[in-house]
Image (cartoon, rainbow, N blue to C red):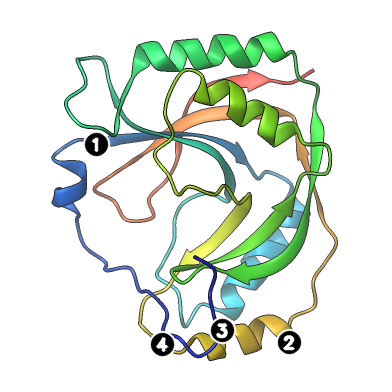
Amino acid sequence: MRLKPSTLLCPTEDRDYPEWHHGRSDYGLWYVEIEQPELIQYLDQMRLHFSDLLLPNHRQYHMTLFVCGFMTTAKKQYNDDFLVQQLQQQIKRLEALQLNAFQLEITQIDSFSSALFLEITDREGVLAQIRQQLALASDEIAALEYCPHITLGVYRDAGSSDTVLQRIQQLPLKNLKIQVKKLTFGYYKAQILQGLLYPYQQIELG
């Protein structure tokens, strides 16, 4: 949910979440890793500007494409389990698209109630094609509406939304492009809050 004026931020507790992971570890997703130095520098600056409001974040900058769930080679036990066989189906579907490298652009700084982010625009509509193919092999474990973005961090306290919105309005926005040359499937360790992403499979684009 987008952040609204005169409301409270929704903080993330810095703890383990056993009621979510049930002892499972590797949480898988498709994503685009941000690797351009100029863009990373800009993201670091934005994160620093809001560092007093955000929890520490060690995860690489990335744009999530599709959230798959907990990786498993066994039979599904929970609704958010994701079979390795489903991953292989997704890879085949993406390879069949024969995508060329494409470009995205950052359009604005914005916030959900729980996290600060930079919104991304896909003028060519490539992301919709990718997500459509991935959804044919697996249900997505995510919010109903997909919003391409780069997360800067999650909020540590239930402060006033007006503080965040005022800071956002004061910041100049650079017109930066994201060059997408590969798609990555990776995972993070569910027991480590905002921990690293580990690439598992990659598809190079033409």
Distance between mark 4 and mark 1 Cα atoms: 31 Å
The amino acid type, in three-letter code, at marker 2 is Gln
The answer to which of 76 and 21 lies nearer the viewer is 76
Which amino acid type corresponds to the residue marked 4 in the rendered image? Gly
Pointers 3 and 4 in contact (C-beta within 8 Å): yes
In this figure, which residue is indicated by the disc labeled 4?
A: 159
Closer to the camera: disc 4 or disc 1?
Answer: 4
Residue 96 left/right relative to 107: left
The answer to whether 130 appears left or right of 18 in the picture is right
Q: Residue at x 20, y 43 (%)?
A: 21
Which residue is under mark 2?
170
> Earlier along the polypeptide chain: callout 3 or callout 4?
4
Element marked by disc 2: helix
In this picture, is 134 found above or below 93?
below
Tell me how far mark 1 sits from mark 2, CA to CA. Answer: 40 Å
Q: Position of residue 84 (x, y in %)?
A: 36, 15
* Alpha carbon separation for disc pair 3 and 2: 10 Å
Q: Earlier in the sequence, mark 1 or mark 2?
A: 1
Q: Amino acid at mark 3?
A: Val
Give the structural element (helix, strand or loop) at label 4. loop
Q: Earlier in the sequence, mark 4 or mark 1?
A: 1
Spot occupied by residue 145 in the image (x, y as percentages of width and height): 54, 49
Q: Is residue 171 left or right of residue 156?
A: right
Rendered image: mark on residue 25? 1
Are dots 2 and 4 in contact, CB under 8 Å? no
Q: Secondary structure at mark 1?
A: loop
Closer to the camera in the image, 55 or 132: 132
Q: Alpha-carbon distance for marks 2 and 4? A: 19 Å
Mark 3 vs 2, N-terminal side: 3
